[in-house]
Image (cartoon, grey):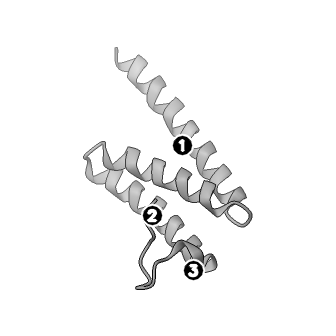
Amino acid sequence: MLSSFTRRSRKQSRGESARGQVAVAVAGTHPDISLAIWKKLADGQIDLVKPKAYEEAAGYLRQMRGIYPKFPSYCNEEGGLTPN
């Protein structure tokens, strides 16, 4: 049972890593897709309800924060994020 969990965790980590790489690659040309990927990754970590997962989620949210200033149309008048 433990080995099954370990394999699944490794697979999930590789999948998250690949999605993160795609998000970085498309951030300049397709910020909406990049933001959606980062949001999904952050939400997945937050759903784990563990301190380490919150740290991971914070990294994804920082990635998102880096995209918004480059694309002001994704921000509302107060400088906050425009909800989807």
Q: Residues within 10 Å of mark 1 (few under 14, many from 20)?
A: some
The answer for how far apart the CA atoms under marks 2 and 1 are is 14 Å
Q: Is residue 16 left or right of residue 33?
A: left
- Say whether disc 2 or disc 3 marks the residue closer to the N-terminus: 2
Task: Residue type at mark 2: give it.
Answer: Leu
Compute the Cα span from label 2 to label 3: 14 Å
The residue type indicated by label 1 comes to: Glu
- Name the spot of residue 49 as percent of width and height, x first: 25, 46
Q: Nearer the viewer, mark 1 or mark 3?
A: 3
Residue, far top: 1
> Which residue is identified by label 1?
16
Q: Which mark is residue 69?
A: 3
Indicate which disc residue 61 carries: 2
Above or below: residue 66 compared with residue 77: above
Give the side of residue 69 with respect to residue 51, left or right: right
Residue under the point 67% across and 63% down: 27
Q: Residue at x 41, y 55 (%)?
A: 56
**Residue farthest bottom in this picture:** 78
- When asked about the image quadrant of residue 17, the answer is top right
Q: Earlier in the sequence, mark 2 or mark 1?
A: 1
